[in-house]
């Protein structure tokens, strides 16, 4: 029995030493390396479990071959090369080139965009487009709930599948953990090709639970695309926002969502035109990931006619569909945010439901403020998770002390992920300003170079401001007691895991 203890201790030491060598050889930022070293040394057993789930460097893995990626991308490349009179604004050429070179996210002109900030309107448009589909429907979502809205969407997809339309669905396995398998099986029996993204069969023995597909994409007939922050669940069409006066001061912040009728505020785009090719490419990469089927047929990239899409009297927005993932060589969307913040001349407005910024993004925000740029951040007053709210407090306080104007949205839970800058650039998608979105999740955003779109997005932010309260009007601004600051600092250490 004594030998068993020694053997166990020896195995544990070998695992710890091996893990420490792996962390060291990953050549991460010194601060991250030292943090994981301390976790492994000073948290026996717990430390190795945390590293197994959250510390492994997945960017070295190649889950899709370069050859396959080339084939999945070549259709969009053909159309990109064929575009005539494509002029990239001078102020954004560096950003556009960055996304093109490192992400294969080609800029496309000849687009029209509808912006939805209301779930009723968005899902009404989506159901209408689904009903009119004649060739294929490609749906990629983090949550596909087995509720009234989820079944309504499922019924619409089933109806089109029975009419001979190709329907493919990708849902995230962790995002849909609470959904009974019979919900998806009903769609499969109707002829819909349904796949779970990176299934997690034994959560206690895999790190897959930490790397999820958080994208919300839909492509219909290769002509119409959707991208944004709305999942398929009734909470996105729940209730209507009730404005709260700007002068209505509050003594606290961060009430957890408990009422079932809490209004949800989000932002989603419906795009028609050439950039739908970018959304299609993003979906087909995910499809290859889950099905190992390489779909490159040109019929999924049909010829586009701009009649009825763009107004020839006005230049259409230039759009890049940018994706990021933990297996990409670089954190593409995070690097885009950093560049936008550092190149901004006048202002940057950001909405995010979770504010747990990575060090490069937080540093860029502070640098922009200190350069005289008007940086405004909007986060929910009402949160959907108490732990994240506690973890974000110190970041919010630090940002406000630097000079970032922080607003707390009070007319419900603001799940919107948007950024707008200098009346000429904006982005909407699934990416939160947190560690998980920037480093762990599979995300997708539309980056749009266009004055009209930027002004529309700016107007949305300013409307949300009327339903918000400034950080300066909250008791949160006061220096908290030692115990509260200590707890915030402890929870902040978990930011990369939340």
Image (cartoon, rainbow, N blue to C red):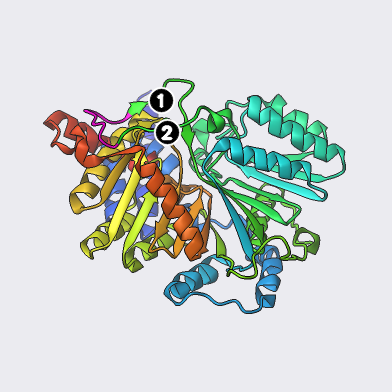
Q: Quadrant of residue 482?
A: top left
Q: Is residue 366 left or right of residue 163?
A: left
Out of 435 and 123, give the one closest to the viewer. Answer: 123
Q: Is residue 312 left or right of residue 459?
A: right
Q: CA distance from mark 1 to mark 2?
A: 8 Å
Q: Residues within 10 Å of mark 1 (few under 14, many from 20)?
A: some
Name the residue located 43 percent from the left edge and 51 percent from the top edge. 459
Residue 250 percent location from the top left of the image: 24, 29
Q: Is residue 432 left or right of residue 153?
A: left
Q: Quadrant of residue 468?
A: top left
Mark 1–mark 2 contact, CB under 8 Å?
yes
Q: Residue furthest bottom?
A: 85
Q: Which residue is mark 2?
A: 413
The N terminus lies in which quarter of the figure?
Answer: top left
Region rendered in magenta: 246-254
Whether residue 334 appears in magenta in the rendering, the answer is no
Name the residue located 72 percent from the left edge and 57 percent from the top edge. 223
Residue 440 percent location from the top left of the image: 46, 48
């Amino acid at each position: 029995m004594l030998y068993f203890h020694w053997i166990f201790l020896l195995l544990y030491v070998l695992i710890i030493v091996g893990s420490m060598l792996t962390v060291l050889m990953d050549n991460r930022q010194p601060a991250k390396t030292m943090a994981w070293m301390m976790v492994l040394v000073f948290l026996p057993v717990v430390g190795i479990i945390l590293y197994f789930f959250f510390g492994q460097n997945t960017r070295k893995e190649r889950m899709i071959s370069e050859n396959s990626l080339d084939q999945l991308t070549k259709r969009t490349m053909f159309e990109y090369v064929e575009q005539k009179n494509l002029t990239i604004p001078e102020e954004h050429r560096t950003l556009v080139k960055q996304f093109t070179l490192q992400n294969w996210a080609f800029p496309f002109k000849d687009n029209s965009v509808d912006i939805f900030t209301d779930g009723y309107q968005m899902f009404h448009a989506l159901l209408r487009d689904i009903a009119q589909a004649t060739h294929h429907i490609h749906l990629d979502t983090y949550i596909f709930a087995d509720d009234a809205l989820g079944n309504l969407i499922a019924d619409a997809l089933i109806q089109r599948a029975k009419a001979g339309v190709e329907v493919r669905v990708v849902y995230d396995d962790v995002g849909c953990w609470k959904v009974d398998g019979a919900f998806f099986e009903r769609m499969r029996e109707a002829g819909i090709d349904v796949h779970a993204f990176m299934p997690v069969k034994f959560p206690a023995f895999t790190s897959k639970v930490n790397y999820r597909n958080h994208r919300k994409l839909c492509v219909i007939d290769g002509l119409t695309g959707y991208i944004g922050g709305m999942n398929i669940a009734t909470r996105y069409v729940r209730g209507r926002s009730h404005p709260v006066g700007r002068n209505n001061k509050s003594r606290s912040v961060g009430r957890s969502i408990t009422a079932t009728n809490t209004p949800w505020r989000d932002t989603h785009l419906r795009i028609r035109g050439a950039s739908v090719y970018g959304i299609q490419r993003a979906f087909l990469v995910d499809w290859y990931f889950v099905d190992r089927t390489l779909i490159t047929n040109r019929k999924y990239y049909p010829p586009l006619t701009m009649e009825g899409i763009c107004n020839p009297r006005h230049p259409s927005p230039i759009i890049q569909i940018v994706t990021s993932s933990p297996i990409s060589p670089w954190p593409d969307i995070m690097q885009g945010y950093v560049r936008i913040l550092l190149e901004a001349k006048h202002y940057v407005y950001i909405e995010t439901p979770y504010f747990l910024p990575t060090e490069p993004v937080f540093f860029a925000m502070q640098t922009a403020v200190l350069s005289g740029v008007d940086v405004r951040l909007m986060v929910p007053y009402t949160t959907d998770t108490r732990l994240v709210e506690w973890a974000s407090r110190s970041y919010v306080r630090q940002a406000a002390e630097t000079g970032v104007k922080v607003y707390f949205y009070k007319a419900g839970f603001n799940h919107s992920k948007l950024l707008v800058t200098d009346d000429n650039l904006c982005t909407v998608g699934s990416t939160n300003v947190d560690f998980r979105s920037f480093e762990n999740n599979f995300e997708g955003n539309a980056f749009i170079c266009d004055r009209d779109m930027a002004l529309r997005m700016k107007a949305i932010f300013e409307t949300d401001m009327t339903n918000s309260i400034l950080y300066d009007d909250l008791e949160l601004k006061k220096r908290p007691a030692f115990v509260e600051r200590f707890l915030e600092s402890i929870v902040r250490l978990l930011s990369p895991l939340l």
